[in-house]
Amino acid sequence: MKSNSFNKKSLENFFNQGDPFLLARTLEGKLYRDYANRKTKKFEYEGASYFLKYHGPVGWKEIFKNIVQLKIPVIGAKREWDALQKLKILGLGCPEPLFFMKRGLNPARQESFLITKDLGETVSLEDFFDKNLFQKLTVLEKRKLVTLVAKICRKIHQNGLNHRDLYLCHFHVNQDNPLDNEIYLIDLHRGQIRKKVPFRWAVKDIGGLLHSILPFGISERECYRFLMLYFNCSLKEVMEKRKNFIDSARSRAYAMHMKPILSEISINSRKDLKNDSRYVKEEGKDYKWIGLKNSLNSSIQNALKDLDGTMKSGKVIKKEKGHFIVSLNLGGKEIFIKKYQIKNKWHFVRKIFRKSRASTSWIAIHWLRAIGISTVQPVVIYENFNCLFKLDSYLITERIDGVILSESIKDKEKDLLIASKIDSFFKKLRWINFNHGDSKTSNFFLHQDKLITFDLDTSKKYVPSWVAKKKLDKDINRILRSVGMNNRLHILLRRRIER
C-alpha cells in the first residue's frame, strides 16, 4: 500500500518517474546523516535546494528492542511530516514540508521519505553558543534570544507537540541576523502530537534543552527568565507552583550532562579512553590510576611509581589512622596527596564492596564542579589492590589558595558574603540530590570571595529525593553548629536557608 502527500507539484512529478523509493535511496546529493535505516541528503532540483529524509525498514528486532526498553520505536517519516505541518499551523519557523511518501502496512518493512525546503544560510544555536557569540550579545539581545526560544517551547507544548530531541542544535537562526524574530525548529522525526503534552514528556524536552545549554555557562538568571516566559508567570509563581517541574527537569539535565563524564572518569571502566579525552589512565598488576592530562606533568607521573616514597618528602598536613595528607611541589606544581588508609579489620570488611574513599571524592568533585560549586582541582586518583580487594587509595589535587572558613568567620565584615555563599552551596546541592557528608567550617576555604569545598570522601548522590533532603538537612545543621561562635553569621545563615 502506498500513500503520499505533496505541497509542490514539480517534486511529485519528479518522484513519480519509476520507483520513487529507489530514487530516494540513490538520489545524488550531500549526505548529512547515514544512521542505521535513516539517511538525510541535501540535493538540488530546478535551481532550488531541498533536504530529503529517507526512512528504510527498521525490522522487528529493533521494534521489540525499543518496546523492551520502554521506548517508542521511530518508524518512518510520518511523525516528522505531521509535526512540521503542526508547526506551520502554529505559525512557528521550521523547514517547509513539501513532499511525503510511504509504502507498506507491515511496520517492520515500511519505507517512507519526506522532502523539505532548504532553510538557506542558517546556523544552529549550538554553533552560535560554541563560537561564544551568545556571550558577546548585549543584555537586551540575550533577553530577546531567550524570549524567542522560551515562546517556541511554550507554544509547542501548549498545543500538544513535544519534540523528544529538544536541544540547542535543533534550533536554527539566520546566519547574518540571528535575532530577526525567526527561529527554525528542525529534526522532529521523534516528535509526538497529542491533545496535551504529559508532564513527563514536557520535563524531558526542557531537561534536554537545559542539558544542551550547560556546557556554555548560561547564567542562572537567564534560566529563570526562560522559565518565567515558558510558564508565563512571575518568578514567585515559578518557584512556588512549578518547583516539581523545575526539579525534575534540572535533575534530568544534570544526569544527562554527567553520564558521559562519569563513564570517562571511572577508574573501574575497562573501556579505552578516546584520543581526544581530557584524561589518561594506566593499569598494572596491582594498581590503577586515572588523571587529567593538563594537570599531569612528568614529575607527578614519576611519583605515581612510588607514592608512599614520594609522600615521605612532603610536608605533613594531617596524619591520622584513616588519613595521611602531605603537600609538596612536583615539577613546579603545588599539590596535595591524600592517602586513604584501612584503619582496622572491621573497616576493611565494610569497604570490601564499596567504592574507595578516593573514588567517592573524585566523583563528587566532578559532580560539584558541574553545577558551579568551587572545589579542589583534581589531578589523579590512584588505587592499590590485591587479587580480591582494594587496599589503599590516593587522591592528588592542586593546592588550595585562600583562608580556611573557620578563620574567615572571625571577620565580621564578611558575614553577609559567607552567609550568601553557604546558602548558594546548599541550594546547588539540592539541584542534584547531593550532600557533602561533613560540612563544617574546616572543610571550606574562602578565596577572592569564592567558597571552595573539599574533603568530599563521604559525599554522595541520593535517590529518592526525600533521602537526599534528609541527608542535606544534616549537613545544614552541621554547618550551623560549626559557625555557632559567630552569632550574627549563624542568624543570617539560618534566615537565608529557611526562606
Image: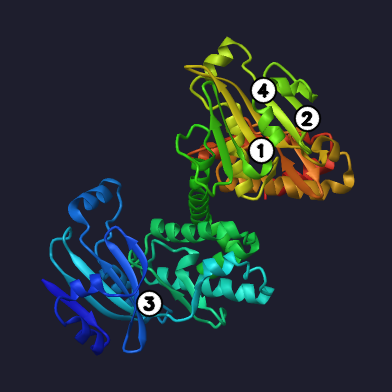
**Which residue lies under the disc numbered 3?**
87
Which callout, 2 or 4, points at the residue further toward the start of the chain? Answer: 4
As shown in the figure, which amino acid type bears the numbered disc 4?
A: Asp
Camera-near label (4 vs 3) is 4
**Which residue lies under the disc numbered 1?**
379
Which callout, 4 or 3, points at the residue further toward the start of the chain? Answer: 3
* Residue 290 as seen in the image, left or right of residue 163: right
Q: What element carries label 4?
A: loop
Where 252 sits versus 480, above or below? below
Residue 409, given in percent of the width and then of the height, sits at 84, 40
Which callout, 2 or 3, points at the residue further toward the start of the chain? Answer: 3
The reply to whether dot 2 and dot 4 touch (C-beta < 8 Å) is no
Q: Residue at the spot x=25%, y=85% of the render?
A: 11
Q: Which colouring convention does the figure follow?
A: rainbow
**From mark 2 to mark 3, how far is it between C-alphas?**
60 Å
**Which residue lies under the disc numbered 2?**
327
Residue 306: numbered disc: 4
Which callout, 2 or 1, points at the residue further toward the start of the chain? Answer: 2
